[in-house]
């Protein structure tokens, strides 16, 4: 199939526009805050904040109706999975459901992608109405197959991928003010009613995003308008699917409608917020931690809700080598997770990656790239990622239809795709089967088809839950029910044919294929406590001539500087990682940083306007123990700099206690 204009191209246009607007608006924060956005913020200034501050209360420490095995939930600002804190590092894979080529990726591509990830990884992709239901279905079922998590954005605020509902113009134009003012209750809400409830029982859904980058076309989309949109949509999603989290999909605090970040995310059905940033390539700033993240992380923590980096990327800027890009992105992962982000998602993955040196390219990486290899192998700080299901759930047991006890008339069916090539079926209302088991949860798998009806599922004689086995096309071994977490011990599952069907089904068939019983997970060992300490320039050992500088903004109001090639400072520490903070300025040059006498890494301290305490270097993860970092003035500079100054301000050491 002929490839439609790639999202890399589309994103290029959007990012170039941001850069041009940023150049007009000035500033030293990555260039995304335009003059219009600044005017918007001013127009919604102190009176607006004064009205809303008293209404901002920490979120209740609950996010799902009942915590279910394998489902992501939250406790306050911490994402959780199976009783443990869940941090994630993953990728955006926008093309999985059809945006890249106009058709969903093939099953072979999906299998290759999801099977290559470590268990419980999180991937973000699109579930836009314009792309249809088939791609969403394929992605969910494949993610289930490999034990993966997916964040689905339900619409596109930027108007790409054919998402024309409410769009102000052609491809890549924002939605109209009227759409945010209430137009969303039409086709968009119809789509949510179609797609969301279908997957309410799937552990593959990490969360639903209301939209990718919701933002007003003009200042008419105020924070009040956006909050109403967020709250209405989140309430609808929760009414259809109480089992999964809801994220706003927000871009940042500088767009129309989300300038009061706390207020717009304070609704009871909004669980999570996000920030998107591509600041590293902007004006060659090589920014690790975006100022837009720093502006809102404290606000979300005050609401007791998680914040994740929904998109970050370096693109193919500066014609960096693939390994250099991977190293820089690892620094971003380290920095964001250390500063309280719930997760970081790189943009992005594609089986047909971009090439060239466009600084605003989407920078999609293909299978086997250094960025993908690093992301898959990245060690989550504190080792809080859930372990693979095998070792933790050693008594996970599968029972086929021959192990069930039947009441009523059930016939035997056979065919490839069924568990062990056989199942049973009935059309008799009231017929049922049961399974007695010992464990903490049970998952039910069976066929779905156009002529299948509705069954009622219960555990231990409790309240029945209706499960619709209808599907427009036949599928075998479909996960149709997951029990709540049960006390460890003996239980009985019952599945009853109700004799009813939804209007689209042609009959009321009920089927029995297999059940998977899970025992209680083993108790994880206590994790070592991570400690962080700061050290100023007075604690460093110096070589050569260094002068003292003073001024507000420097750590403890002082630092040191040198311009002579060969001048150096070092610091001995005990820990697992070290960060270097220094000033950046138009007359600063390039320093060489090394750990334990290893190879030097060049770090450019040039910046078009001065900044203090900038994070300029993060070490790789080191073995816990004694180490020494050394920073050397090289006497070199990039072409834009007017000098070769190197500075020393502070370091931050991370250590396992």
Image: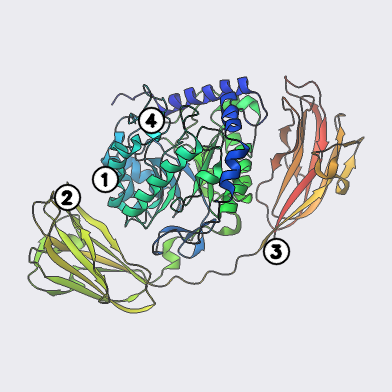
Which residue bears the numbered disc 2? Answer: 474
Q: Quadrant of the N terminus?
A: top left
Residue situated in front as seen by the camera: 73 or 222: 222
Which residue bears the numbered disc 3? Answer: 657
**Is residue 633 visible to the viewer in this orientation of the structure?**
yes
From the image, state whether disc 1 or disc 4 is nearer to you: 4
Q: Residue at x 59, y 32 (%)?
A: 41
| Mark 2 residue crowding within 10 angstroms, few (<14) / some (14–19) / many (20+) | some
- Classify residue 615 by image quadrant: top right
Q: Residue at x 9, y 67 (%)?
A: 429
Which residue bears the numbered disc 1? Answer: 194
Q: Quadrant of the C terminus?
A: bottom right
From the image, state whether disc 1 or disc 3 is nearer to you: 1
Q: Are marks 3 and 2 in contact (CB under 8 Å)?
A: no
Labels 1 and 3: the sequence-earlier one: 1
Q: Position of residue 528 (x, y in %)?
A: 64, 64
| Callout 1 secondary element | helix
Q: CA distance from mark 3 to mark 2?
A: 54 Å
Q: Position of residue 536 (x, y in %)?
A: 83, 47
Q: CA distance from mark 2 to mark 4?
A: 41 Å
| Callout 4 secondary element | helix
Residue 178, numbered circle:
4
From the image, state whether disc 1 or disc 2 is nearer to you: 1
């Amino acid at each position: 199939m002929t490839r439609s204009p790639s999202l890399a191209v589309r994103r290029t246009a959007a990012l170039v526009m941001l850069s041009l607007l940023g150049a007009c608006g000035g500033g030293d924060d990555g260039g995304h805050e335009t003059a219009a956005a600044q005017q918007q913020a001013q127009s919604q200034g102190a009176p607006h904040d004064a009205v809303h501050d008293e209404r901002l209360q920490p979120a209740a420490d609950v996010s799902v109706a009942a915590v279910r095995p394998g489902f992501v939930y939250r406790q306050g600002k911490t994402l959780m999975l199976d009783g443990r804190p869940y941090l994630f590092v993953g990728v955006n894979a926008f093309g999985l459901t059809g945006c890249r080529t106009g058709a969903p990726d093939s099953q072979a591509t999906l299998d290759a992608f999801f099977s290559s990830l470590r268990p419980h990884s999180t991937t973000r992709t699109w579930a836009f109405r314009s792309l249809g239901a088939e791609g969403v279905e394929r992605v969910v079922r494949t993610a289930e197959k490999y034990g993966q998590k997916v964040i689905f954005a339900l619409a596109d605020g930027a108007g790409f991928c054919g998402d024309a509902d409410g769009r102000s113009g052609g491809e890549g134009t924002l939605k109209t003010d009227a759409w945010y003012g209430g137009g969303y209750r039409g086709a968009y809400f119809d789509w949510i009613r179609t797609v969301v409830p279908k997957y309410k029982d799937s552990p593959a859904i990490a969360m639903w995003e209301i939209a990718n980058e919701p933002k007003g076309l003009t200042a008419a989309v105020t924070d009040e308008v956006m909050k109403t949109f967020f709250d209405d949509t989140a309430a609808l999603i929760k009414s259809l699917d109480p089992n999964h989290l809801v994220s706003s999909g927000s871009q940042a605090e500088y767009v129309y409608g989300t300038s009061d970040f706390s207020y717009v995310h304070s609704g009871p059905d909004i669980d999570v917020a996000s920030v998107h940033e591509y600041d590293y390539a902007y004006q060659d700033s090589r920014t690790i931690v975006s100022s837009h993240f720093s502006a809102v992380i404290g606000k979300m923590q005050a609401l007791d809700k998680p914040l994740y980096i929904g998109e970050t990327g370096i693109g193919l800027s500066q014609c960096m080598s693939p390994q250099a890009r991977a190293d820089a992105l690892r620094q971003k992962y380290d920095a964001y997770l250390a500063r309280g982000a719930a997760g970081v998602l790189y943009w992005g993955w594609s089986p047909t990656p971009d090439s060239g040196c466009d600084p605003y390219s989407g920078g999609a990486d293909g299978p086997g790239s250094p960025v993908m290899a690093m992301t898959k192998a990245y060690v989550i700080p504190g080792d809080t990622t859930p372990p693979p299901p095998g070792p933790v759930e050693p008594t996970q047991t599968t029972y086929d239809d021959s192990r069930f006890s039947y009441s009523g008339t059930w016939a035997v069916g056979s065919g490839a795709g069924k568990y062990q090539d056989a199942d049973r079926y009935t059309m008799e209302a009231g017929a049922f089967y049961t399974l007695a088991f010992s464990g903490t949860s049970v998952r039910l798998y069976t066929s779905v088809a156009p002529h299948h009806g509705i069954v009622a599922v219960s555990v231990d004689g409790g309240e029945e839950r209706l499960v619709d086995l209808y599907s427009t096309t036949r599928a075998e071994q479909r996960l149709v029910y997951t029990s709540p977490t049960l006390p460890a011990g003996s239980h009985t599952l019952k599945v009853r044919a109700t004799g009813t069907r939804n209007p689209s089904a042609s009959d009321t068939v009920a089927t029995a294929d297999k059940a998977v019983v899970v025992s209680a997970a083993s108790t994880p060992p206590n994790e070592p406590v991570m400690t962080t300490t700061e050290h100023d320039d007075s604690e460093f050992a110096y070589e050569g001539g260094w002068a003292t500088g003073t001024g507000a903004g420097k750590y403890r109001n002082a630092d040191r500087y040198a311009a002579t090639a060969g001048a150096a400072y070092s610091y001995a520490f005990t820990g697992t990682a070290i960060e270097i903070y220094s000033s950046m300025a138009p007359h600063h040059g390039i320093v060489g940083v090394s750990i334990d006498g290893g190879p030097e890494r060049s770090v450019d301290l040039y910046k078009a306007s001065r900044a203090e305490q900038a994070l300029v270097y993060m070490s790789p993860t080191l073995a816990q123990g004694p180490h020494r970092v050394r920073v050397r003035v090289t006497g070199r500079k990039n072409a834009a700099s007017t000098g070769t100054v190197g500075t020393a301000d502070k370091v931050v050491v991370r250590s396992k206690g």
